[in-house]
Image (cartoon, helix red, strand yellow):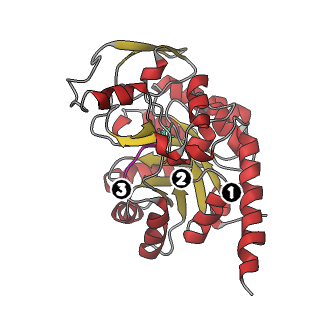
């Protein structure tokens, strides 16, 4: 049985978290991960207030096990924190803001019994999160998919945060694609692992099928760290697959925003019960299963762990495989090294 204090903090069976992924990690994915014993996270960044309410309710209908919600600080709008707090989820993850400016929100969630996780990209940010009173730090390495907060790889970041903050419950994110990665993260001082890219290529993820297929076929070196997809969220570095639109932009000399090929042209419409959103070239939103149009031109967020993603699987199966492989690695590869 693979058990760390993270399991006790959230009331889960295994120290595995599915990352909040706006538009991609909906109620179905989160519920499937939680049902399998991990902590499933609903990525709420792409939802309206009504959408948030519906998505959380839908996940809670699918599982009675602990669930988390993810909020991106620059996208917080009036009323959102209150709606999420009302749901009394096991945890809420915040990303991309100064935690010290959100101490009252942190306390409000804790008051209703939700643990607060802050995803950080460096040691200083992790210190600020602890000072602000969060329950758990999620440390995101540079190899991560999606928006990337810092510059340091997971392998260097986790021990540095563990040394700086010996007591803090710590989740490693970035580059973990299987049980070997989880075992390594635990060895480095983390109490668990969060995976985004691996859970993107699941039956339950709301990513467009062609996006899932591209991730399955990609290698680590097929990703690029860039600020290209900035419409809706400027100057926010992210890691994406090197798709045709990235190559086209590179071919013409990487022009600055305003001068890129096809700037301002509508390429896709997102159609969902709560929204109908036209997206222009270089939009921040990824291709979801409710996107219609030139979806190849949207950002295919993926981490370097894409090289470890070989097949589309149900999310629960991934949780079980990771637990089994991490346990094998610890028991049969690491333990016998001690003589
Ligand atoms: C498609 C995608 C979308 C993401 N969206 C979010 C998001 O909305 N909020 C967030 O906190 N992190 C987001 N992330 C980053 C994850 O929280 C996490 O740091 C990352 O997935 C870990 O690296 P990995 O992809 O190698 O597992 C996203 C990642 C991916 C791959």
Residue 241 is covered by the magenta coloring: no
Residue 113 in view here = no
Q: Where's residue 295, x and y in %? A: 48, 19
What residue is shown with label 2?
Answer: 175
Q: Which mark is residue 179?
A: 1
Location of residue 78 by image quarter: top left
Residue 275 in view here = yes
Whole-angstrom CA distance, mark 2 to mark 3, is 14 Å
Give the quarter of the figure containing the C terminus.
bottom right
Identify the residue at horizontal 25%, vertical 24% (top origin).
Answer: 260
Which secondary structure is most common in the magenta stretch? loop
Of residue 244 and residue 278, the one placed in the foreground of this image is 244
Extreme-front residue of the structure: 251
**Which type of secondary structure does the marked residue at label 3 adopt?**
loop
> How many other residues sit within 10 Å of disc 3, few (<14), some (14-19) or many (≥20)?
few
Is residue 183 rendered to the left or right of residue 325?
Answer: left
**Which type of secondary structure does the marked residue at label 1 adopt?**
helix
Span of residues in magenta:
146-150
């Amino acid at each position: 049985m693979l058990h760390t204090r993270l399991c006790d903090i959230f009331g889960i069976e295994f120290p595995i978290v599915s990352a909040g992924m706006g538009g991609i990690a909906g109620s179905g994915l989160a519920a499937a991960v939680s049902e399998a014993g991990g902590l499933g996270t609903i990525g709420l960044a792409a939802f309206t207030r009504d959408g948030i309410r519906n998505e959380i309710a839908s996940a809670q209908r699918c599982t009675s096990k602990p669930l988390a919600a993810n909020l991106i600080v620059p996208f917080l709008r009036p009323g959102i924190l209150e709606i999420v707090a009302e749901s009394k989820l096991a945890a809420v993850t915040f990303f991309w803001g100064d935690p010290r400016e959100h101490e009252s929100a942190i306390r409000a969630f804790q008051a209703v019994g939700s643990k607060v996780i802050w995803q950080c990209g460096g040691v200083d940010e992790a210190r600020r999160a602890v000072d602000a009173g969060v329950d758990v730090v999620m440390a995101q390495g540079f190899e991560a998919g999606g928006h990337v907060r810092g510059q340091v790889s997971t392998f260097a970041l986790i021990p540095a945060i563990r040394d700086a903050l010996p007591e803090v419950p710590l989740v490693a994110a970035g580059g973990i694609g299987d049980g070997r990665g989880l075992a390594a993260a635990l060895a480095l001082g983390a109490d668990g692992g969060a995976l985004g890219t691996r859970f993107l290529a699941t039956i339950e993820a709301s990513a467009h099928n062609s996006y899932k297929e591209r991730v399955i076929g990609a290698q680590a070196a097929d990703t690029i760290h860039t600020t290209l997809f900035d419409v809706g969220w400027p100057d926010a570095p992210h890691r994406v697959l090197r798709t045709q639109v990235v190559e086209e932009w590179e071919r013409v000399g990487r022009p600055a925003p305003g001068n890129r090929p096809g700037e301002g042209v509508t390429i896709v419409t997102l159609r969902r019960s709560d929204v109908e959103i036209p997206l222009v070239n270089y939009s921040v939103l990824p291709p979801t299963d409710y996107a219609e149009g030139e979806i190849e031109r949207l950002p295919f967020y993926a981490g370097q762990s894409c090289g470890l993603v070989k097949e589309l699987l149900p999310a629960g199966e991934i949780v079980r495989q990771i637990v089994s492989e991490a346990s094998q690695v610890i028991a049969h590869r690491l333990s016998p090294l001690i003589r």
